[in-house]
Image (cartoon, helix red, strand yellow):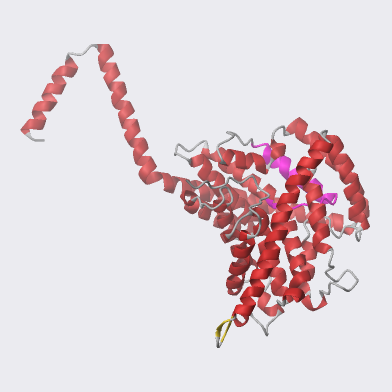
Amino acid sequence: MNFRDFGKYNQFKEQFAGMSPEMKEQMMRMAKEQMKARFSAFVQKWLSLPILTIAALALGALVGALTAFFGQVLLAVSAVRDANPLYWIPGLALIGIAIVLGYKKFGKGTERGMDMVFGVAHGKENEIPLRMIPMVAVSTWLTHLFGGSAGREGVAIQIGATLGHNISKKIPVENAGKILLIAGMAAGFAGLFQTPLAAIALSLEVLLVGYLNLSALLPATAAAFTAYKVSEMLGLEKFSVELHTLFPDSNVAGLLWSETGLNIQFVLKLALLGVLFGIVGGGFAKMLSIAKKLFANKLPNAVKRIAFVGIALSLLLLLFWQGRYAGLGTNLIDLCFANPQAANVNAAGDATVFACDWILKFALTIATIAVGFKGGEVTPLFAIGATFGTWVAAMVGVPLPLAAALGYAAVFGGATNTLLAPIFIGAEIFGFDTLPAFFIVCVVAFVCNGGQSIYAQKKLRLK
């Protein structure tokens, strides 16, 4: 301290000594507020990202455990239904009534599910109650036990988003709520499907079309990989296909490139597939929106709506090969890849993929979700895409297993209006050597889906 500073200090000391007690208290209060503001600014600048990343690691571990438990129970109840479809599928309407009444009594407000999650993410709503987790998990198990054609990703994403949102309340960091909500979404998807790269991409791009929320990149990455590893350690199995073993004489690199360079003809075939998959995915999202409004207008009473449509669904599900289109649709996906030589769309028998598989799964899933049964749409979309790809493979001139794999990912991308997520999920499920083909098809599908989405996305407004 030099003499000038010492003089200022003495001058301030004299002024402070001459103040009234009230003035001294006010000065001390102001000094504390300034210190608090400076500390808060320091935390926001240097510590917010490490704090949120550490929180995301804990969030990922918790979500990974919960999604592993949820997924294993779901597989168990699906096996019970598949063993005795005639016992369970006729009760779909009754369990639908129970789901509606259960939400009215115990989960009021949470029946909106993903719409509530997106509402909070967009700042339109403030709260995701913890009761959403048991409500959506139990109602999804019941939906699948009684044959509803639904998915499972909605539960995983809601589990992650709910926990992330509620944990963020304890963290005094700006924008913690949105960042941990996104991280929770990534953890839920990664824990259930064990595709962390796709989960990260989906969580970052699904909220706002044409924009990546990179402020959440590191926490989402930490949460996704942690959830993936925890669910793997807890025994939840990942679906994957070694695609190159299904058509070893004609791999993706060999189809795309030759000694003369890029195979433009094959690229055009992939682009045509992209157009078709984009239309199917976008059409699913559009028809789901129309069906929700139609059922709500024609049958405004939620109990009657799910009861009447549930009866019709039971009859249809039993009529079409006693539950072939019930549940997730993983049986259809397995048919597309288990023995591609036997996947003859014109043959008859349970070991084949029928030409009508994709459209019947398409319609029954829309009806199931639109009237209020729970679960999600993504796994049925995988099944729709794979069976549709199997059907059009010969017409377009693309190897059948590759076309089924491309449809698996691209129809999902078309229905969610996402680009990076389907590319990554294709590579993580079918091998990274297939990435160029998924890139071409998913880009075209994204362009051709009509801007439709099964989720309540925001549109990016360019000024």
Give the answer, above or below, for where 372 lies relative to 407.
above
Magenta region, residue range: 130-153
Judge by depth and name the residue closer to the eye, 164 or 444.
444
- The image quarter containing residue 408 is bottom right
Question: Can residue 75 be seen?
Answer: yes
Residue at the front extreme, as displayed:
463
Q: Residue at x 68, y 52 (%)?
A: 153
Residue at the left extreme, as displayed:
3
**Residue 244 spot, x, y in % from top left:** 66, 78
Give the answer, above or below, for where 202 lies relative to 43.
below
Give the answer, above or below, for where 328 lies relative to 397.
above
Task: Answer with left or right where residue 19 lies relative to residue 48.
Answer: left
- The image quarter containing residue 47 is top left
**Residue 169 spot, x, y in % from top left:** 52, 36
**Residue 49 spot, x, y in % from top left:** 43, 47
Q: Is residue 451 magenta?
A: no
- Which of the image's four quarters has the N terminus? top left
Task: Answer with left or right where residue 168 lies relative to residue 97.
Answer: left
**Residue 195 spot, x, y in % from top left:** 61, 61
